[in-house]
Image: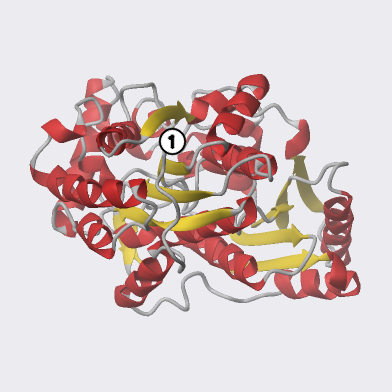
Amino acid sequence: MTTVILSAASPEHPSLQAIAAFLESELRARAEQDIRSFELAQLELEYCHGDFECWAKTPGACRIHDAEQDIVRAIHDADRVVLLDPVTFGGHGYTLKRALDRMISLLLPQFRTRSALTHHPVRYEKPASWYALGYLPRADAQQTATFRALADANAINYLAPFVAAAVLDDAQREAWPDTIRAMLGSSERPGQEIRARAALREELLAAAAGALGAPLQTAKSAALLIGSAKIKGTSGSELMARALGARLERAGVVTRLHFATEFADDAEALATADAVARCDLFVLVTPLYGDGLPALATRALELVAKLRSAAHPSGRFSMLVNCGFPEPEHNRTALRIARHFADCAGYHWAGGLPLGGGGILNGKQPLDTQGGPAEHIKRALDLAAPALASGENVPREALIHMLKTPLPDPLYRLVGDLGFRYLLYRNGVRQRELRARPLDY
């Protein structure tokens, strides 16, 4: 059996390094000799630019040339993939997320239904099993549950035959070997606990609801962070952030927009994180990447959480997250990650707005000039902005409006499939190349 380990262990995480050693020891005890480990903290990896060129311009291949090419090829050849990193707000940290976001070249852009929701088909015939091994200094049942849910969601995404996840902590070091052994021996199938979409809707509603408590003081300042790494003026996240910002300004809140790409440079990242941390209200407006947040958005949250202290005022955090699938339920795990961030960073969780079918929006046209499928989004923002400005949570009515489906799911999937075929045509790529398998050669 061939195993690929994507490891974020580094000298600043000695416990993770010890876990990595236990992991490799257990793999060798199983007589596995074909083990390839990528030490992600030592690699210069770019973040995903979100342009989908690996689907529509160079199908099956990322245009960025760095170590990710070796990672993707190794995963293509593997029977098992193990992700190893610190649990970050219930999800993966920036170091690992950089690599994970750019694995979508292993998928096809078309839409198919499995585990009650729309997903992409896999590009290759032999997907690897999926294992996630996380570390927390202290046990945290809620973050552990989110980490397990994220592993299952990603295993469904990549059509993995088996999935398992475990979170280790320093209080139970003696149990590490047995826990790792049990994880590797798991026969759990991805999505086996998913019975129907209705249960996923309930999970989504629970994750999106604001935390209990009396309204806080009226917001005087707000930072809106656009999580998309696309070129400015082209993303659905940016147009929704600008529309929300305009509404907050009308409610008397001084609002500033920031972009995730500001977190690609260390010096600019720290300055931006400090500016965000000082605001009364922080709203992340982001696309969904692999059932979590994009790498740069994750880095932003990591830095803001570190900077939050008594020097900064108490504040509130909210998130608007949109996915390209028609079902907003895909956003449920990302919303749980957002809630964990709020707790870790000392924010009051003011609730979230999950959008499905975000691909229907024209990212180059202001939201308020768009009609039809955008109407429910504008109505949700009309209700959410004054509530957030006055220190309250996102109203449930705003959440219900955002959950409305812009098109019937089958029609959305059809339009999406045709849209990617049009992109191939526009890029001068033959239609048969859509399913190209460059790693088979």
Which of the pair 97/223 is nearer the observer? 223
Q: Position of residue 338 (x, y in %)?
A: 51, 54
Q: Which residue lies most toward the front here?
A: 217
Vertical comparison of 234 with 344: above or below: above
Q: Quadrant of residue 364?
A: top left
Q: Position of residue 135 (x, y in %)?
A: 75, 59
Q: Secondary structure at mark 1?
A: strand
Looking at numbered disc 1 in the image, what kind of residue is underneath it? Ser
Residue drawn at the location 62% of the way across and 46% of the way down: 75
Residue drawn at the location 33% of the way across and 54% of the way down: 353
Vertical comparison of 407 with 264: above or below: below
| 424 left or right of 209 in image | left
Vertical comparison of 209 with 411: above or below: below
Q: Which residue lies most toward the left here?
A: 372
Q: Position of residue 345 (x, y in %)?
A: 62, 50
Residue, disc 1? 221
Asked if residue 203 can be seen in this view, the reply is yes
Q: Position of residue 354 (x, y in %)?
A: 33, 54
Vertical comparison of 353 with 200: above or below: above
Q: Tell me the crowding category of disc 1: few under 14, some 14 to 19, or many 20 or more residues within 10 angstroms, Cα based.
A: many
Residue drawn at the location 27% of the way across and 39% of the way down: 251
Asked if residue 51 can be seen in this view, the reply is no
Q: Quadrant of residue 161?
A: bottom right
Q: Quadrant of the C terminus?
A: top right
Which of the pair 431/140 is nearer the observer? 140
Residue drawn at the location 22% of the way across and 62% of the way down: 397
Q: Quadrant of the N terminus?
A: bottom right
Q: Quadrant of residue 201?
A: bottom left
